[in-house]
Each structure stands twice: as structure tokens, then as C-alpha cells.
Amino acid sequence: MNSCRGARTAMVVGAGVAGLTAAAALAGAGWQVEIAEVSPSRATSGWGLCLTGPALRALAGLGLADDCLAAGYGMSVITHVDADGEPAGRARLPSLLGARRPAMAGIARPVLHRILHAEAERRGAVVRHGLTVTAVDQEGELVHVGLSDGTVRQVALLVGADGIRSSARGLLGLATSLDYHGQMVWRALVPRPQWATGIHQFAGKAGTAGLVPLSVSRAYVFLTENGVERSVLPEAELVPRLQQMLETFPGRMAEVLPLVSASESESVVRRPVLTAFLAGAWNRGNGVVIGDAAHAPAPQMASGAALAIEDGLVLAEELGRHSSVGAGLEAFVRRRGQRCRTLVETSVAIARLERAQRHRETYPLTETGHRLMAEPA
Ligand SMILES: Cc1cc2nc3c(=O)[nH]c(=O)nc-3n(C[C@H](O)[C@H](O)[C@H](O)COP(=O)(O)OP(=O)(O)OC[C@H]3O[C@@H](n4cnc5c(N)ncnc54)[C@H](O)[C@@H]3O)c2cc1C
């Protein structure tokens, strides 16, 4: 039995955006942190993410915003095109990091993970791959965490950051449903067209699609398929099926089509739109869940990563402010609950309107969601 006792010891389950951020923030505050990540290697399968202003602001809290801007593609404008190909709005977003910095950034997921990984390790967190949690038992101020390699840790804090299908959540005795919203989302990595210097979003007859730059040379295409059963397509069908759907979109989407055909089939992914929100407590004793394990919005608001990064920072902050882990976790959940609930609910409302082809009605909701997220975390 491997024992690691101590007042400020933490086991984090999951080396995703939330887990790595929490580990970096906790280690920076003097905690001894170990991360158990189920994937056997650091390689993260790779499509892109949009880091909105609040995500960049939270990354700045870890000193990482400039690294992400340098490794990704900074931008400030979202262009909407309606189903007839007419411009439906062009929003220039203010930067939360000051006028000299862009409002948001597109970044390849593996690049973001590499930056977060390096920072967590630089601050002293230990990341173990191919490891998961199998049992959780709490005794007074100690959490006994059983791991899949047969070892046990005794720590002051357990953080479940293992995503929407969290195992840690179940082991802590917390339960939530995963809700499917009749939409499948697609992502495809493509070369960046020169004109794509901001986000372009196109409303089609049957869904929405668009383009997000990730670097000077790359971008990703996104597409939301509406009113479909949840299903898995054979890999060979992904590229032709995506092309077929993109053909129905107006405007410059026609220019993106040949780029998708050139893309490798493994750079195209299709996922169900699932949401989750843990309505009651997110903590039990000295264990807590964060990130998608507690609140997973639909991807339409592009804010799940922002919430996950904020969680890591706020968790370390509240634990630093309170004399017991339990009191720190209560304060963390109080501070995060309403913001995350509103964001998840807004994303679900947007998904519902998209399904009903009421795209224009989604714009004010998206704006309200972003305004909420611009408030301090
Ligand atoms: C298609 C799509 C597009 C999206 N686009 C955006 C976007 O543009 N902008 C944005 O902000 N958000 C976006 N999101 C949401 C964003 O990806 C998530 O909110 C964010 O990744 C949540 O981070 P997390 O660390 O909580 O979970 P995850 O990123 O899911 O990380 C969980 C980690 O835990 C590990 N793990 C899982 N189970 C176990 C286990 N049992 N034991 C140990 N480790 C485990 C996983 O391997 C993973 O490393 C998108 C989501 C989807 C599905």
C-alpha cells in the first residue's frame, strides 16, 4: 500500500483541462498534487477548441494566456451568415485582457494540453498515466483513494476532474443524468483559408456550420447536425457525409468544402451533444467534482473549457481562504453553482432553438451567455 498522508495533499482524477488547471493552481498554492489519468500516454486526440475571453482571463491567472495566444490564433470578430447567404451580423468582441490582446483564441486541443501539462509539472504536480480511481473511502479528514494499480493514497482532498462520464462522481456517491439533445456535432481539421481571420458561423437549412482558425496554417470546421438519433458512423463514411452536409451551406462554406475533402479521415470527428449538470452538492466530505464532471454545457457556447479552467483557479483560491477542506469545498460550490447552471441551461436553450431552425433567436441568447461569462468568476 502506497500511503501519502498530509494536510495539503491532493489526488486529482483526470488530466484534462479542469484537472491540469486545478493541479497547477493547487501546486502553486503549496499543495502536494498527484494526477491519475486513465489514458496511457500524453497524446490527446486532436481537434480544436475556441478559448473565449473568460478562458483566456482564467489562463492569465496561471500566467499562461500569452503562451496560448502564441501557440494558437488570436481573434476578435464573429461573423454570422444566415441561411440565404446574407450577412446576419458581425460582432467585434472586447478583450478581457485589455485592448492590446485579442478577445479569444482558437487552439489545437493537444497544444493546450501540452501547455497545461508542462505548467502543472513545473509547479510540482506529478502526472501518472494509465491509472484510474477504483474506490473512495472517507474517514475523518482523510480520503482513502484506491487506484487501478492496486495502490492506495490517503489524501486531504480528492478532485474528480474526469469529464462528463466521471467515475469519481459515482464513487463519491454523486449522480446526474447525461442529456442528449438530438444533435450530433462534427469537427474537421483543415488548412486555414487566408480570409478566415475570425470565427465564421453559417446558418444552413438543417443545421449550423462554421470555421475557427487554430494557427496561421490550420483551422477547424464545425457543423451541427439537427434532429438526429444518436449514432456512430463507420470511419470511412465520415468525410463524404460531412462534405454532403457542407454542400447545403451558403456563402464561403463552398470554399471550405475542398479543404475537408483533402483532410484525413482521422481528423474528422462526430460526437453527440450531451449536457450534464449536478443539481445538488458537487462535494461529499473532502471529495469534489469539477469541470465537465459537474457541469457540461453543449459546445455551442464554446465555454466548457472556460468553466473548467475557472473551476481549477477558484478551487485553489477557496481552499486557501478556509481553515478546513470541507469549508473550502462548500465555498467553492457556492461560488460556482449558479454561473455554471445558467451557462449549461443557456446552451441547452440554444440547442433547442437550433433544432427548431430558429437560428436568429439564438444570437441574443449567445450574447447573454457571453455577457454572464465576462463577469468575474
Ligand atoms: C465537440 C466539442 C467541442 C467543444 N468545443 C469547445 C470549445 O470550442 N470551447 C470550449 O471552451 N469548450 C468546448 N467544448 C467543451 C470542452 O471540451 C469541455 O468542457 C472541457 O474539455 C472540459 O474539461 P474537463 O477537464 O472537465 O473534461 P475532459 O476534457 O473530458 O477531460 C477529462 C480527462 O479525464 C480523463 N479521464 C476520464 N475518465 C477517467 C477515469 N476514470 N480515470 C482517470 N482519468 C479519466 C480523460 O482521459 C481526460 O483526460 C467542446 C466539447 C465538445 C464535445
Image (cartoon, grey):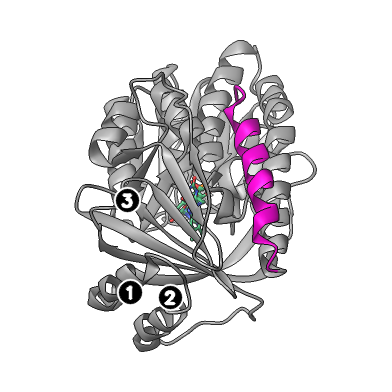
The residue that mark 1 highlights is 257
* Residue type at tag 2: Leu
- Can residue 307 be seen at all in this image of the molecule? yes
Q: Does the magenta run of residues contain 374?
A: yes
Disc 1/disc 2 C-alpha distance (Å): 7 Å
Asked which quadrant contains residue 131, the reply is bottom left
In magenta, the rendered stretch is: 357-377
The mark nearer the N terminus, 2 or 3, is: 3
181 versus 365 height, above or below: below
Disc 3/disc 1 C-alpha distance (Å): 16 Å
60 versus 286 height, above or below: above
* Residue type at tag 1: Leu
Specify the principal SS of the magenta part.
helix
Disc 2/disc 3 C-alpha distance (Å): 18 Å
Q: Residue furthest left?
A: 217
The residue that mark 2 highlights is 246
For label 3, being within 8 Å of ligand 1 is answered no
Image location of residue 323, percent across then percent down: 65, 12
Quadrant location of the C terminus?
A: top right
**Residue contact between numbered discs 3 and 1, judged by CB atoms under 8 Å:** no
286 versus 162 height, above or below: above
**Residue contact between numbered discs 1 and 2, judged by CB atoms under 8 Å:** yes
Asked which quadrant contains residue 230, the reply is bottom right
- Residue at (41% x, 29% y) in the render: 59
Secondary structure under badge 3?
strand
Q: Does the magenta run of residues contain 373?
A: yes
Q: Residue 213 bears which disc, if any? A: 3
Asked which quadrant contains residue 280, the reply is top right
